[in-house]
Image (cartoon, grey):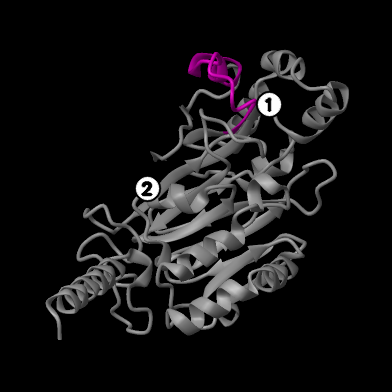
C-alpha cells in the first residue's frame, strides 16, 4: 500500500472515530432500554423527580410560567405549575415551553407521571403532548397519566398521527419503547376525585370560564399541606368553598387599570375586553375569594395582562389587600413556595 493511500486511510479512520465519539456523548442517544439508563437514573438524595440535591420529603410548589394568554412574552412564561410531593412531580397545565421550564426548575422529565389540565385554552394545553414526547425522548420508560376535560384522548391520537414518522424512527433507531401505550387518558366533565394515592388526594370542581366548558380548579391534599389551583375563572363563589382552609391558593388575576393600555394595541379591542371581563377575576375579586376561603397564603398567578413590566407588585396587591389580610405572593416564573 502506498504512503499516500495509508495516510488517507488513517485520516478516514480518525474522522469516523471522532464522529462516533461525538455521537456517543449526545444526551438524546443515551441507552433507552436499560432500566438504569442515564435518563431514568434516580438522583441519590433529590427524590424521584427533582435534582436539587436536597431532601425530597415534603410538598413544594414551583410556578413554572405565570403569564396569562397564549402570546409569548419576555417577562413571563406561559401558564404551568408543578407540585413536588416527596420529590414526585405533579404538573398542572402545560403552556408553551413547559418542558424547558421544568428543566430549569431541576425536574427530570422522565420522572413525569401525572399531568392535570384545567381547561382547553391553548395557553394551558399547547405543550401537553410535547411535554410527554420530550420526556419520552429523554428516557421515559413508565406510564404517564393525563387528567382533564374531554378531548384529551383525541389530542393524543392526533399527536401520535402527526408525529408518526419521528416516533417510529426513534423507536426503531434509538431503542425507545412504543410511545402511545405509555399515555393513559382520564377525562371527566364534572366535579370528582381525580387521583388518590399514598402521596396526595386530588379533587376537581367546576369553575366559570365563560364559554370554555368544562373548566376545572384542582385541590391537592398532601400530608403537609393543601394547595388549590383556581385554573382560569371569573369571580366564582364556588371556588371559595372548594378552597376552604387551604394552606395555599394559587389564583389567576386581572388588573383592570392596565386593560386600557393593552386594548390600544388590539384591533379587536371591544371583543377582547368583553372576553376578558367575562372570563377572569379582578384583583379586588381575588381578595374576596381568598378571604372567604380563609386560606393561609394567596399566590397571584396567570397575570392579565402578563407582559406589562410597568405593573408593580404593589399594584397587583393593592386591591387584593382590601379584603384579604393573609400572606400574598406575587408569582414569578420558577418561584418556589
The quadrant in which residue 51 appears is bottom left
Residue 24: mark in rendering = none
Q: Residue at x 21, y 73 (%)?
A: 8
- Report whether residue 179 is seen: no
User: Which is more N-terminal, label 2 or label 1?
Assistant: 2
Element at label 1: helix
Q: Which residues are magenta?
A: 302-320
| Left or right, 242 with reference to 53 | right
Q: Nearer the viewer, residue 25 or 101?
A: 25
| Left or right, 104 with reference to 164 | left
User: For mark 1, does the 10 Å Cα neighbourhood hold few (<14), some (14 to 19), or many (20 or more) residues?
Assistant: many
Residue 105: mark in rendering = 2
Asked if residue 259 lies in the magenta stretch, the reply is no
Q: Residue at x 67, y 36 (%)?
A: 69
The quadrant in which residue 4 appears is bottom left
Q: For the C terminus, give its image quadrant.
A: top left
Q: Which residue is mark 1?
A: 285
Q: Nearer the viewer, mark 1 or mark 2?
A: 2
Q: For the N terminus, give its image quadrant.
A: bottom left
Amino acid at each position: 500500500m502506498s504512503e499516500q493511500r495509508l495516510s488517507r486511510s488513517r485520516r478516514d479512520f480518525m474522522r469516523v472515530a471522532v464522529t462516533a465519539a461525538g455521537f456517543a456523548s449526545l444526551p438524546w442517544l443515551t441507552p433507552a432500554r436499560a432500566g438504569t439508563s442515564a435518563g431514568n437514573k434516580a438522583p441519590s438524595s433529590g427524590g424521584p423527580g427533582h435534582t436539587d440535591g436536597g431532601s425530597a420529603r415534603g410538598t413544594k410548589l414551583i410556578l413554572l410560567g405565570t403569564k396569562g394568554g397564549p402570546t409569548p412574552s419576555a417577562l413571563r412564561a406561559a401558564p404551568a405549575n408543578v407540585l413536588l410531593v416527596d420529590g414526585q412531580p405533579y404538573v398542572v397545565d402545560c403552556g408553551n415551553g413547559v418542558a424547558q421550564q421544568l428543566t430549569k426548575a431541576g425536574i427530570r422529565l422522565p420522572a413525569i407521571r401525572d399531568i392535570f389540565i384545567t381547561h382547553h385554552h391553548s395557553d394551558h394545553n399547547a405543550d401537553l403532548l410535547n411535554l410527554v414526547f420530550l420526556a419520552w425522548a429523554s428516557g421515559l420508560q413508565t406510564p404517564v397519566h393525563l387528567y382533564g376535560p374531554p378531548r384529551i384522548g383525541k389530542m393524543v391520537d392526533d399527536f401520535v398521527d402527526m408525529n408518526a414518522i419521528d416516533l417510529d424512527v426513534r423507536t426503531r433507531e434509538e431503542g425507545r419503547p412504543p410511545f402511545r401505550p405509555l399515555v393513559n387518558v382520564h377525562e371527566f366533565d364534572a366535579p370528582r376525585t381525580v387521583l388518590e394515592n399514598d402521596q396526595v388526594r386530588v379533587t376537581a370542581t367546576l369553575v366559570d370560564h365563560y364559554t370554555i366548558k368544562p373548566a376545572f380548579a384542582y385541590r391537592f391534599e398532601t400530608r403537609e399541606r393543601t394547595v388549590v389551583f383556581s385554573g382560569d375563572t371569573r369571580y366564582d363563589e364556588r371556588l371559595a368553598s372548594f378552597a376552604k382552609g387551604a394552606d395555599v391558593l394559587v389564583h389567576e388575576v386581572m388588573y383592570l387599570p392596565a386593560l386600557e393600555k393593552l386594548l390600544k394595541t388590539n384591533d379587536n379591542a371591544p371583543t377582547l375586553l368583553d372576553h376578558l371581563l367575562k372570563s377572569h377575576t379582578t384583583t379586588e375579586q381575588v381578595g374576596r375569594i381568598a378571604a372567604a376561603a380563609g386560606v393561609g397564603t394567596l399566590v397571584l398567578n396567570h397575570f392579565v395582562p402578563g407582559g406589562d413590566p410597568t405593573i408593580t407588585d404593589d399594584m397587583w396587591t393593592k386591591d387584593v389587600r382590601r379584603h384579604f389580610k393573609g400572606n400574598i405572593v406575587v408569582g414569578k416564573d420558577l418561584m418556589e413556595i
